[in-house]
Image (cartoon, rainbow, N blue to C red):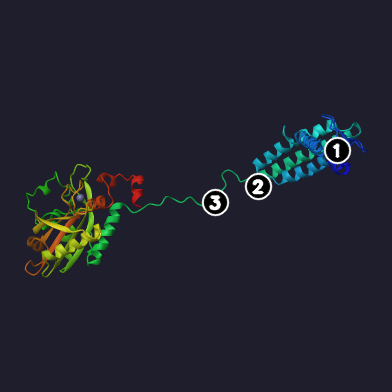
Amino acid sequence: MEPGRNSFFALNLETCGYHQDTASDPIILSSPNPHIILSSHHSVLQTNIILLCVSLISFYKPCPMQLEDIQHLTDTAVADIAAAADETALEAARVRYLGRKGKLPDIMAALKTAAPEQRPQYGQAANQFKTRVGEALDARKSALAATATPANALDVTRPGDLPPLGSIHPIRQIIGRVTEIFDRIGFTVATGPDIDSVFNNFDALNTPADHPSRDPQDTFYLEDGSLLRCHTSPVQVRHMLKHPPPVRIIAPGRAYRRDTPDATHSANFHQVEGLYVDKKVSMADLKSDLTYFAGEVLGPGAKARFRPHFFPFTEPSVEVDFTCHVCKGKGCRVCKNSGWIEIAGAGMVDPNVFQAVNYDPDAVTGYAFGMGLERIAMILLEIDDIRRLYDNDVRFLRQFA
Ligand SMILES: [Zn+2]
């Protein structure tokens, strides 16, 4: 063995309590347990194995603390405690230095194993450690308490709580879409009150006195003789009474009927009515405008179909179907295999209506149409029950935000 090479390890091992018994060959390193002996009689491999074993033993059995280590540790601990950011960090520091598995037990162990003549110095260093660490803990605790925010303090730098943002209701979205489409072909929006007169709601619209819709079982009458309008057509009457022809308006709004709510009926609902009055307005204008609307609202290729019908306020009257949005006209469950879905009622304005609003039926003609907005919303947004539109369940409404 080469003594020079191994003396390096011997020196290192000495700091961990191993002693070189003699400087001469064989080099003998001894320790309390186990005795390690290195000599020139060992091969290089044997020497290395022995040194590895020594290192492992040293690793699992830490070196006792030296006096300078305790003093250095005291300074480190004081600085560490002073830097504790909050009470949690401070408690962690206390455990780290004074806890059962902390540094203090190591210091006490060093005191026990110190040479008798060094024990007073070790004792003094240990006491100093305890005193200074204790003082540092108290000082930091007071400092943290002084700067702590009171429980009810107002923190003006904290980001505010944003109230949840609402969204436009599906019905309002549809009104906006329908209005925008008709705006492009020259219609303006007219509005009227939900409570209206019998004249505006029925009489002026050529509704006979015995018409079933006038029955209190169908219409909500108020004590003063007025009513909740059962369609938005009174807006047309109001508008024509105030404005001479030509007229080109749509009237979106709420209407009321005595309906028992189910998947497709509600006692209050929304309609949009259209009215175009001018010289020589014909059925061709009605077909053209509603076909344009069908394509705009349901997409390219959607068509409108007109079937004869009866309404008191139009003559002739039609019901208007649009191409089924689901099967594109091929026939499906939604359209009951017809390829069409019913959307609107329409027709040429009855001359009696013009007379009621002081228009000359020989000078002007016009068309009118009306359609349910809930129906369009249910088609476009694929809603299966009209009541969902009125339940105000934000989980449902949020889908259409
Ligand atoms: Zn279909």
Which mark's residue is nearer the viewer, 2 or 3?
3
Q: N-terminal of the two: label 2 or label 1?
A: 1
Helix, strand or loop at label 2? It is helix
Q: Which mark is residue 159?
A: none
Q: CA distance from mark 1 to mark 3?
A: 59 Å
Q: Are marks 1 and 3 in contact (CB under 8 Å)?
A: no
- Quarter of the figure that contains the N terminus: top right
Quadrant of res 362: bottom left
Q: Which residue is mark 3?
A: 158
Which mark's residue is nearer the viewer, 2 or 1?
1
Q: Can the viewer see residue 240 in this picture?
A: no
Q: N-terminal of the two: label 2 or label 3?
A: 2
In the image, residue 212 lies at what x, y percent?
Answer: 9, 47
Q: Which mark is residue 147?
A: 2
Q: Nearer the viewer, residue 345 or 257?
A: 345
The kind of residue on which mark 1 rests is Glu
Q: CA distance from mark 2 to mark 1?
A: 49 Å
398 horizontally vs 224: left or right: right
Q: CA distance from mark 2 to mark 3?
A: 17 Å
- Residue at 71% over, 38% down: 96
Q: Nearer the viewer, residue 154 or 104?
A: 104
Q: Counting other residues with Cα less than 10 Å from the Cα at mark 1, is it few (<14), some (14-19), or many (20 or more)?
A: some
